[in-house]
Amino acid sequence: MTSTTCRRETHSRPADSLRRRAASAGLAVAVISIGLFAHSAVAQDSRIDELSAEGEAQVIAWRRDFHQFPELSNREFRTSGVVADALRGMGLEVETGIAHTGVVAYLRGAQERPLVAIRADMDALPVTEVSDLPFASTERVEFRGQEVGVMHACGHDTHMAMVLGVAQNLVTLRDELPGSVLFIFQPAEEGAPEGEEGGAELMLKEGLFERYRPDVIFGMHAFSNLNTGQIGYRAGAIMASADRFRLTVRGRQTHGARPWDGVDPIVTAAQIITGVQTIVSRQVDLTRAPAIVSFGAINGGIRENIIPDSVELIGTIRNLDMATRDMVHERLRTTVNAIAESAGARADFEIVEMYPVTANDRDLTRQMLPTIERVVGRENMVEAEPRTVAEDFSFFALEVPALYLTLGVTPPDVDAATAPANHSPLFYVDEAALVTGVRVLTHLTVDYMAGP
């Protein structure tokens, strides 16, 4: 036993030694590789920040140009021309005329995949600007039969400028990119004019994601409720679905002194308004997600002693959960028709589905949070509350995993809680915030391509 054991030990030592040396060599190679990768990543991070700083003046110039010359939904003719020219000047493959005035550009990196899409919206609002900015909008157009001012009161001018800045950065880095990028400049986010199609839904309908199927899509929106340097994020639903409804309650006209000779649509409409409120307050599980049904206008009758034939009502429906949205729509139809029938009236009721819930992919959000923290610092990350406003980025997010962030644009010395909100004629953007948006979107794109 003793001699045998000694022989085994003698024979095993060279093999053990070789294994130990190999393991040490492998560990050394791994450590060196990790070190080189980390060094490369740090160098690339630094390069992105340098490029963003160098391009800041150009991004601000683009933003001011877009701001001074805003255009309404599906009418972004000049805007799309400026965007397309800038992208062509970077040497990108550019398509125009998508969904009327949309522009897309393709950046081919060192590899075809992964393909990251970045979206900016282009349209302005029928709002008359109130500011003393040297580049304030003085544009005026006819909108729904009235002459109105036009203003980038929702920050879309900043979105376009920032995504152009990201494109500028990534073109410089294209040989180092382990993937490709699709830049989407989308018209009509605020909604196409009546009788027209537009926006993200039309871009998809025309086959955008069939020609270019991205692996993920990123978007960012300027908001006044955060200060410059802050980024808002949220996994899951971040903005509500938005649908509108039209209701005509049809009764039978009669003298106001003899209501029994007719069917009163005004009283019936009042009962419907009251009954509909119980859908949210008594039938929706509000612990799951909030819901809103609001009437925005009611019109019926012309004289105090005439009960009219009909009453017209319009309103909006908001939900933060798609299953709840379907349930609310069903209950609305049931409630409206049942109340009208009980009064002897008839209800012509139509729901126009507009935007779905805007929801961030939970896995993608978790994956990219470290990137955001590295760029802006944990102290500048704000977990956003869901908003009951809507955003047609939601159509893209239904197709591929999406991450939609909010960018603070209120100066640091101003209380963001009291700053004029988006869509206000007083909406103000601190341009120092734009470089933050460019840096975040560039880092997100590069980090996603590099993998977890």
Image (tube, grey):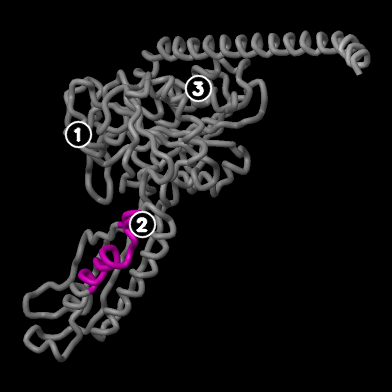
Circles 3, 1 touching at the beta carbon (< 8 Å): no
Helix, strand, or loop for circle 3?
Answer: helix
The quadrant where residue 53 appears: top left
From the image, state whether disc 2 or disc 1 is nearer to you. 1
Q: Assign the N terminus to one quadrant of the image.
A: top right
Residue type at tag 1:
Ala
Asked if marks 2 and 1 touch (Cβ < 8 Å), the reply is: no
N-terminal label among 3 and 2: 3
Closer to the camera in the image, 64 or 323: 323
What residue do we see at 18% from left, 71% from top?
300
Residue 415, by quadrant, is: top left
| Dot label at residue 243 | 2
Main secondary-structure element of the magenta-colored stretch: helix
Q: Which residue is mark 1?
A: 417
- Cα–Cα gap, marks 2 and 1: 28 Å
Amino acid of disc 2: Asp
- Based on the picture, tell me whether residue 277 belongs to the magenta stretch: yes
Q: Residues within 10 Å of mark 3 (few under 14, many from 20)?
A: many
Q: Nearer the viewer, residue 4 or 108?
A: 4
Q: In the structure shown, which secondary structural element does the residue marked by tag 1 occupy?
A: helix
Please say if 352 is above or below 405: below
Magenta span covers which residues? 272-291
Amino acid type, mark 3:
Ala
Label 2: which secondary element: strand
Q: Is residue 197 visible?
A: yes
Disc number at residue 167?
Answer: 3
Residue 176, percent across and down?
61, 16
In the image, taking residue 303 as reference, residue 332 lies left or right, namely right
